[in-house]
Amino acid sequence: MPREWDATAYDALPLPHQQWGKRTLGQLTLNGTERVLDMGCGTGRDTAALLDLLPRGQVVAVDGSLRMLDQLRKRLAGRLDRVEVVYADITEPLPVQGHVDAVTSVATFHWIPDHAKLFAGIAAVLRPGGRFVAECGGLGNIAAVSAAVDSFLGEQPAVWNFAGAEETERRLRDAGFTGIDVALVPDPARLEPGEQLRNYLATVVLGGQLERLPAAEQEAFVTAVAARLAEPVIDYVRLTISATRAAS
């Protein structure tokens, strides 16, 4: 099942996701009339940016968190006439009617265990010749944070899917994409030590682990992970994706 998120706390944090979104959307060439799918749209930050790029177009905003979608509706109040809001588990076939002209996603796909199935689902709704641009955590992402978690809880089952460039390129090709450009980009995020770091870890990074702990133990866990980091840095490595749906 998709994770539920604290959307208000999420939006209050200094998110590097803002720059990741700008970088990802910057790879799209749009004429302003397209229908674009925003997968894992969250609170609608990138959906809003897409609407600015699509004055006569439409965004299909898909997420598996009802709280995130509620926050999106608040953010985009007055602009929802051009947004199709879809609550869906993106690990399953996408409930999107017809084809879209482009697909984008920011900081979502590392939560999806089966990327081959994911890319096949994207190809099924993307028109031939349509563009697919995305970024997510890749191989080596948050290695220091993961080591801190393991040092506190012992070696943990995998929560994330941090894929490498070569396997991602192969999966895209198998799903029917061409013009594939995939890379791993180190992009560490420095935070203020103390409360900001702990809030960021709890809200953005450690949700999967916190779901497995009793509520009474969660605060101590986050504090322990933060204390085990050598500096207040989230050692991100981003997997960037750019590809085109092959012509039929």
Image: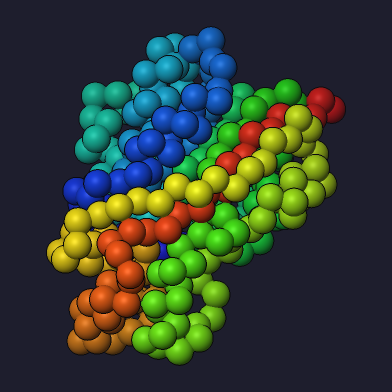
Total numbered labels = 0
In the image, farthest residue toward the front: 230
Report the front residue among 49 and 188: 188
Whether 126 is drawn above or below 82: the answer is below
Q: Is residue 131 above or below residue 197?
A: above
Quadrant position of residue 231: bottom left
Give the residue displayed 26% in from the left and 76% down from the top: 227
Which residue is at the far left? 195
Q: Kindly tell me whether residue 1 is visible in this rendering.
A: no
Towards the viewer: 190 or 93? 190
Q: Position of residue 75 (x, y in %)?
A: 24, 35
Q: Tell me if residue 231 can be seen.
A: yes
**Which residue is located at x 43 percent, y 17 percent?**
53
Quadrant for the C terminus, please.
top right
Colouring scheme, one of rainbow, by chain, secondary structure, one colour: rainbow
Q: Where does the image place residue 225, in percent across and percent down from the top left?
A: 31, 76
Location of residue 185 by image quarter: top right
Q: Position of residue 23 (x, y in %)?
A: 47, 31
Which residue is at a point 37% across and 63% down the rendered structure image? 205
Instruction: Please report the residue visible at 60 percent of the width from the left and 59 percent of the height from the top.
Output: 139
Q: Position of residue 104 (x, y in %)?
A: 53, 35
